[in-house]
Image (cartoon, grey):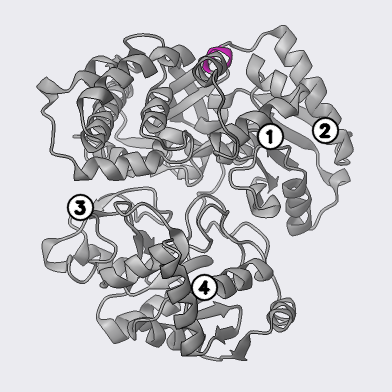
Amino acid sequence: MNILGLWDGHDSGAAILVDGCLVAAVNEERLTRRKLEIQFPARSIEACLRIAGIDSSAIDVVAATTSDVAKALGRVFPATKEAYYQLRRRKRMPGPLLSLRRRGKYRLTEWKPNAVSRWVSNRALAHQLQECGLGAARQDVHDHHACHAAGAAYASGFSSCVVVTIDGVGDGLSSTVSHFRDGMLERIAATPAAQSPGVFFEHVTHLLNMRELEDEGKVMALADYAAPVPDAENPMLALLRADGPTFATAVPSRRLDGPLKDILWRYPNEQFAFMAQRTLERACEAVVGHALRLTGERRIALAGGVASNVKMNRRLRRLEGVDDVFVFPHMGDGGLAVGAALLTHAQHGGAPVAPIAGLGLGPEYPAPAIEAALRKYGVHFSCSRELPRCVARRLIDGEVGLWFEGRMEYGPRALGHRSVLARPDCPALRDRINLLLKRRVWYQPFCPSVLERDARTVLTDLTGRPNRHMTMAYQVAAAHRRALSGVTNVDGSCRPHLVADDDPGPYADLLREVRELNGIGAVLNTSLNIHGEPLVCAPDEAIDVFVRSGADFLAIGPFLATRPVSVGHEVEDRVMRSGA
């Protein structure tokens, strides 16, 4: 059976399962070049079909998700989605009625699916599929949180576990708890959308003048710079709590902005962020702990946008009685296409799905296409037979490099296919990358890629299976914090990408070469993109970033592109003078 998974909302995308094997997955932002794209993923569908090597007529089932009232309206009137996108991403001024519009939007998303919304939504979706040549395929539309849960459960490789989805809103719910065993998911608890931990954190993000659904990681990072507030003095703990295996808010979550605004008036931004992070962690620990006791399980699978909070994930992993935690790699709504496809596969009697290993599920480009792009841009390049060794030497010498290799990553993390690299022990290089490329807030840390053999030494709390997808925080041993000073947070933690010692790929070869030169197989690794743009997909985009940035070199396919030292300094000086 060929199943096309589809998500046409926030961070839209597509995925294809062929006989239960995930062969392609792409998000629309990588192709339209609009970060967290919300339009129908026509280009992602086309790309996935091309990668899978099949025609649209070969798709048996299209598996989609979400048919609540808000989603139905968005499918019928896509201009409403675009208007919200422009506002949320700060592309349009808000106007005098912003508060009312935000509250109305949240109220609308709380409404559950009904017969009318399902009919309208399915008709609008069928029309879009017809335009993509998929009109003959059967159409399955699943529950929003069921798709999150399916992605976490079936991709985890666990024979049984507790599955917890924690999101903003979707199909009238904000969170679910399920028991996964014998290949089946049984939902045992659900939290209504009006009691949403995700919306709670969205309000916090917005009140800190950040973009909700995008900058929650900055709130988490800012929290580490606060003077701690004892729980007994934290007023936010009264706003969000656990009620058994569900969440409860003091008032409907759409109205939490009022009491949160009152709290922000009395506290500095850092402490506001600290109290919000602490409140979220405590509520999630209580909900998950209750679910573990209900089921007797010792393993957890997580999905939903809130599961992108790596500090919270670490606390769940360290709960008493927990053996392992798996976080679906594309945990937010951008991963719903894969979840929907996995759910359809399971419901039609498919065999258990193998765990997701590598996330190189996007397009790949042959050497001739890469060479043609390099020549078009007129950059100096050469072909290297020992590219990992050459790159390792340049990194150890203090250069900043761009790395483009193989198929594009699926999900929000750079995992050695589209990466910016540097030494992990040099805060000055970290700051240079921030100024020239990423332009992140100063308190948001970068992350390392680490060979597993070294991770066992440099991380003090490495439990469960190695985390291959940068979804979990770990603590760096005090003795190794200088060696990882460019990728260690102020609290001594990091969010590592752990690479198998026997991984045969070029990126693992690079880490092994770095280990030979530097003693630890680790590099600073962040996504290959300019601030505000999606991670690059095609060679032209990688070369464009190289030309526009102050990076010293670009390793792309079998080629190494470099620039004269003077040119690199001119670019860097120009960016520094611009106050980036």
Residue at 50% in and 17% down: 173
- Picture quadrant of residue 115: top right
Give the spatial CA distance, label 3 vs label 1.
Answer: 38 Å
Please name the amino acid that badge 4 sits on. Trp
Relative horizontal placement of residue 427, taking residue 374 as reference (left or right): left
Please name the amino acid that badge 2 sits on. Gln
Q: Nearer the viewer, residue 509 or 178?
A: 509
Question: Callout 2: 10 Å neighbours few (<14), some, many (20+)?
Answer: some
Say if the magenta span includes residue 59. no
Find out whether the residues at labels 2 and 3 contact each other: C-beta distance under 8 Å: no
Question: Callout 3: 10 Å neighbours few (<14), some, many (20+)?
Answer: some
Instruction: Please tell me which of labels 2 and 3 falls first in the chain.
Output: 2
Label for residue 461?
3
Instruction: Please tell me which of labels 2 and 1 falls first in the chain.
Output: 1
Instruction: Please tell me which of labels 2 and 4 falls first in the chain.
Output: 2
State which quarter of the image contains the N terminus. top right
Q: Nearer the viewer, residue 192 or 155?
A: 192
Give the spatial CA distance, label 4 vs label 1.
Answer: 30 Å
Find out whether the residues at labels 2 and 1 contact each other: C-beta distance under 8 Å: yes
Please name the amino acid that badge 3 sits on. Asp
Q: Which residue is mark 4?
A: 403
Residue numbers of the magenta segment: 106-110
Label for residue 8?
1
